[in-house]
Amino acid sequence: MDTDSHRTHKQPHKQQGTRETRRVRGPLHRILTKAASCVLAIGVCAAGLAACGTSSASEVTLDFFQYKFEASDWFTKAARDFEQMHPGIRVNVNNSPNAVTDLRTRLVKNRTPDVITINGDINYGMLAEAGVFHDFTDDPVVGTLNPGMVKIAKNLVQTDDPSHKRLYGLPFAGNASGYIINAQLWRKAGLDPDNPPTTYDGFINALKTFKQKGITPVAASYGDPWTLQAPLASLSSTLVPESEYARLKAGKTTFSELWTPTAQKLVEIYQNYVQANPGITYQQATQDFANGKAAVLPLGTYAIPQVRLINKNIDIRFAQMPATNNPKEQKLTAGDDVMLTMGANTKHPKEAREFIDFLMSRERLEDYARAQSAFTPLKETYVGDKALQGVVPFFEESRLTDFCDHYVPPSINIAGFMTTLVQTGNVDQFTKSMQAEYDKAQARNFR
């Protein structure tokens, strides 16, 4: 649904002389003439007063397209705060529940918003490559940002030309994929939640320990298949260099080569260490985890607010999911959950930039991070939830890689293939199905 507001501009009425109007004479003509003169005089006076005071005509209205539905209240309040500090600028906030579809519709109709928040995924990458967003590559603000998050944003741009991998949006908030720890259950099993495993074998041994102690190791949620993409991304960050996806696109490697090790590990985890009924929903899984029914929730930081909503006193940690047995090789799956940009050809570049600078202030970034359990994009990483503190070193050392599914066309039903994989354990079928669908998507790509 397009939530854009339309402003109506009245066109001046052109008076048409006719035989009838030319025949108006005498008293009636004089009355009409005097009335017209009075109206004209009033208009002139009003115009003069407007010139001396504040005029709505001089006010600039920014069209702000905001994609993250969960943060709609925060962004709306931020816009109102900005307006108070900038009396000549109004911000029309469009919180869209169907962001990708709505934004594409706006762009097709040549109604590009002035300021935009967008998820840093393949959809952003395709729009960035099309040139609809402002280029921030050489902007001084980039020097204040986390290099790892900037690199992720550049790599998303869907082009085969490395020189065109530019920064078309500013990282505003980061998230990460790994797993959430129920600290109480870890201690009950004799494990230290503040020192989670740094190797894959160590992680599996922890799951075995929970099982031996009668504690459900992992809260799965096949009922919402997208949740299986979280551990896929968590493990792939360490196992598959991001550069391999360019080779995949060029036909120089295959999903069998890239994802077989990851798929094998997912089968091991999901066929041995989940609850008796793994077919529950995301909502139910987070509720069960929050109520102490599982030691590990294999999702990203985005699930933390939901867990705390259910149990505000829960003691949790967030950890990187190790994929090899060398601690030094581990990388954290992280994404530019919210990117902030403006239209390449906005009619209000000065005002749009003022609003962006306002949102990118340290105060606003940290406030948002607290509200959404996120990471700030600055070089000095701030975490909005103490549970995230354990993975801060990955940000500080730029040991970050993007979500692997950001390199897969959105038309491919990864979640469906993932469900079949963890239920059947057939890794070969999974990678072949992915390859077949990927090849079809590439064949439809005329760029």
Image (cartoon, grey):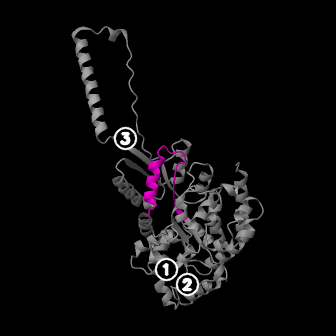
Q: Nearer the viewer, mark 3 or mark 2?
A: 3
| 397 relative to 434 in the view: left or right | left
**Viewer-proximal residue, 147 or 213?**
147
Indicate the amino acid at tag 3: Ser
Residue name at image x 47 percent, y 72 percent: 382
- Whether residue 341 is visible here, answered yes or no, is yes
Residue 297 percent location from the top left of the image = 52, 76
Whether label 1 touches label 2, CB < 8 Å: yes
Which residue, given by chain and number where applicable, does mark 1 sit on? 317
Which residue, given by chain and number where applicable, does mark 2 sit on? 196
Near mark 3 (Cα within 10 A), the count class, few <14, some 14-19 or many ≥20, is few
Q: Earlier in the sequence, mark 1 or mark 3?
A: 3
Indicate the amino acid at tag 2: Pro
- The image quarter containing residue 305 is bottom left
Q: Nearer the viewer, mark 1 or mark 3?
A: 3
Q: CA distance from mark 3 to mark 2?
A: 58 Å
| 352 part of magenta stretch | yes
- The image quarter containing residue 109 is top right
Kindly state the secondary structure of the residue where label 2 is placed.
loop
Indicate the amino acid at tag 1: Arg
- Above or below, comparing residue 198 to residue 352 in the picture: below
